[in-house]
């Protein structure tokens, strides 16, 4: 078992897909990791896929149409297996080839894009699953090392000026534009990088959730390198 992850009290370690989906979050634990050292050549798959937009969804038939080496075939089988397992579980997995996400640079004091530390919110009970097969991988932050940006006085004052409406509607305004989902690391924060090949389950903010949602962000991509990410 990997000590880098198991040393963190917010991360629970599992060894099968069944354990990943059937283990509930509890206490401080709002992240589960199915730790895997994957065989296969994922770079070969990425090099053959066609990027149509900055984020291009890749479908099973796209993978099946590739002419791959033995190592490439192993990688393809792993991805198809993950997609099938999550679909059978009832999730809606998406495999994305990513050059970059859209940036939100409209306001210089708060960003609402996925490169900013944030939590996911859902009106129904769900979780976020993700696995980076190739390229840079996401970071998470312990909740006690993250400050909700709308609680930082300078940012809050600027948002109140931007709102320019009745005080009683301010909180709804923050939710409507997703400002309340974004966080700033504390000065001593130590982000945890999720690495490649592991399948992760992150806690989401929803009405039935018993634990704090997981604070995470997308990584800045390496120059001239695409990411291959499964997410749902």
Image (tube, rainbow, N blue to C red):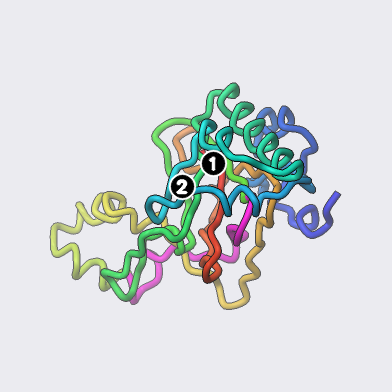
Q: Residue at x 14, y 64 (%)?
A: 164
Q: How many marks?
A: 2
Q: Secondary structure at mark 2?
A: loop
- Image coordinates of residue 11 in percent, x first then y, are 71, 50
Note whether 153 is above or below 101 in the view shown. below
The residue tagged 2 is: 120
Note whether 147 is above or below 130 in the view shown. below
- Image coordinates of residue 1 in percent, x first then y, are 86, 49
Along the viewing direction, whichever of 183 and 140 lies nearer the viewer: 140
- Image coordinates of residue 162 in percent, x first then y, are 19, 67
Note whether 221 is above or below 132 in the view shown. below
- Image coordinates of residue 84 in percent, x first then y, are 61, 27
For label 2, the crowd category at 10 Å Cα-Cα, with few meaning under 14, some 14 to 19 and many 20 or more, is some
Along the viewing direction, whichever of 14 and 152 lies nearer the viewer: 14
Dot placed on the residue nearer the N-terminal end, 1 or 2: 2
Judged left or right of residue 101, residue 186 is right
For label 1, the crowd category at 10 Å Cα-Cα, with few meaning under 14, some 14 to 19 and many 20 or more, is some
Q: Residue at x 65, y 69 (%)?
A: 190
Can residue 140 be seen?
no
The part of the image, by quadrant, that contains residue 170 is bottom left
Can residue 195 be seen?
yes
Residue 91 drawn in magenta: no
Residue 154 drawn in magenta: yes
Look at the image and give the residue range highlighted in magenta. Answer: 133-155
Q: Residue furthest left?
A: 165
The residue tagged 1 is: 128
Q: Residue at x 73, y 42 (%)?
A: 34
- State if disc 2 and disc 1 touch (CB < 8 Å): yes
Along the viewing direction, whichever of 74 and 212 lies nearer the viewer: 74
């Amino acid at each position: 078992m990997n000590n880098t992850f198991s040393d963190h009290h917010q991360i629970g370690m599992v060894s099968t897909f069944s354990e990943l989906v059937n283990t509930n979050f509890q206490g401080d634990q709002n992240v589960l990791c199915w730790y895997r050292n994957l065989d296969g050549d994922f770079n070969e798959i990425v090099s053959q896929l066609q990027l149509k937009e900055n984020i291009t969804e890749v479908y099973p038939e796209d993978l099946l149409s590739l002419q791959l080496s033995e190592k490439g075939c192993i990688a393809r089988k792993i991805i198809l297996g993950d997609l099938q397992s999550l679909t059978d579980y009832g999730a809606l997995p998406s495999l994305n080839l990513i050059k970059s996400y859209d940036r939100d640079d409209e306001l210089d004091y708060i960003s609402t894009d996925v490169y900013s530390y944030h939590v996911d919110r859902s009106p129904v009970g769900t979780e976020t699953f993700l696995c980076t097969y190739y390229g840079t991988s996401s970071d998470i932050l312990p909740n006690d090392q993250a400050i909700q940006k709308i609680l930082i006085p300078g940012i809050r004052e600027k948002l109140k000026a931007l709102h320019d409406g009745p005080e009683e509607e301010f909180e709804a305004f923050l939710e409507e534009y997703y400002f309340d989902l974004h966080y700033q690391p504390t000065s001593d924060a130590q982000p945890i990088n999720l690495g490649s090949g592991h399948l992760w389950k992150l806690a989401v903010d929803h009405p039935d959730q018993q634990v704090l949602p997981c604070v995470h962000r997308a990584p800045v991509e390496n120059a001239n390198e695409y990411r291959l990410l499964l997410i749902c």
